[in-house]
Amino acid sequence: MSEWTRVGFCIFGCLISQWAQAHKPLSASDGAAFHGLVHQANQEKTMAIPPVASGTPAVNLLKHALAHGHGILQLGGFWSKQGQSQQVNINGLIGDYFNVTKSQSGNFLLGLGYLKDGKDIKRAKMQYGLNWFYLSPTSVKGTVLQEASFTNLAYSYHLTHYPLYAIAKSTFQTRFPDKEVTLDVGIGPNFMTTSQFKETSLGANTLQDGIFSGTTTTTLSATAGISLKCGHFVGPTQAELGYRFFYLGQGHFNPSNNQILNKLSTGAAFANALVFTLSI
């Protein structure tokens, strides 16, 4: 793991700690009172405990969470750039050169999260929380120059991303009472899945090698977004429409046999997205 990756995960851990502290349900005095009650219950063995209705703790927890924070649901489209032209070395041979001819691709994304209200900083209303995204599969295409002689094969593969971010979000009031501008940044792991590596013959006598297989790689990822928020979209639900940037890290394909001497890299992946957000 590189030094920058270690630093990134340390920052992720600090944001998680900040979010967890904001979620702390009991104050110091409440905690002392709770421990006093437990001590008293241990001394009075015959004390009757009133029954609790089934499901009540979960309902109360949900009410508490929504009273002090917001659940968010996101839907949008994104355009990504990935892929890297590179030499693949083969034992005893010159090797193949994998050239990228199509590195940009688009698809839809989904997001879920929870943001806890924090302490305001000057004009900014602060929130902290977690935000998970699903970036549906995108593709990379290219050609293969075999043994530095002939371009006889085309290839393609798919990438799917599942990033999880610790988010810090600030909201600013505009001149319009029901309109606000939001800015947010996040950092965390991206679970990148590489799949469906496929080669296609460009000549009648060329055999497909199928020399790579997909895998899942955990990479350091970051995101930043800006949006316009409209209050009271449907009842208490608020709506946002905005732009989001993703840095998704770098993945790879594993060699399918021991004659292939190096992995096939995806290169660094980036995405630009238009996202519609509902917050409750």
Image (cartoon, rainbow, N blue to C red):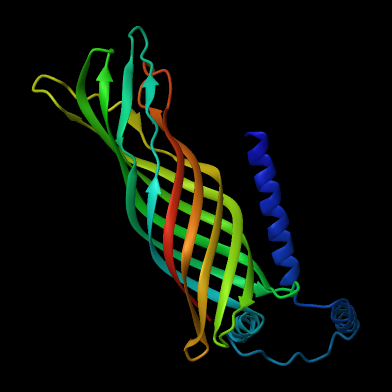
Residue 187, horizontal then vertical, whole percent = 61, 53
Classify residue 99 as left or right of residue 15: left
Res. 255 image quadrant: top left
* Vertical placement of residue 157 versus 87, above or below: below
* Vertical placement of residue 147 versus 162, above or below: above
Residue at coordinates 69% horizontally, 73% vertically from top-left? 124
Q: How many labels does the image show?
A: 0
Residue 76, horizontal then vertical, whole percent = 39, 65
Res. 32 image quadrant: bottom right
Residue at coordinates 48% horizontally, 38% vertically from top-left? 250
Residue at coordinates 89% horizontally, 80% vertically from top-left? 29
* Vertical placement of residue 93 versus 138, above or below: above
Residue 158, horizontal then vertical, whole percent = 33, 43
Residue 126, horizontal then vertical, whole percent = 68, 72
Res. 113 image quadrant: bottom right
For this rendering, which residue is in front, 37 or 64? 64
Q: In which quarter of the image is the N terminus?
A: top right
Classify residue 1 as left or right of residue 17: left
Residue that extends furthest to the left in the rendered view of this protein: 204
Classify residue 135 as left or right of residue 69: left
For this rendering, which residue is in front, 41 or 23? 23
For this rendering, which residue is in front, 243 or 111? 243
Residue that extends furthest to the front in the rendered view of this protein: 175
Residue at coordinates 75% horizontally, 74% vertically from top-left? 122
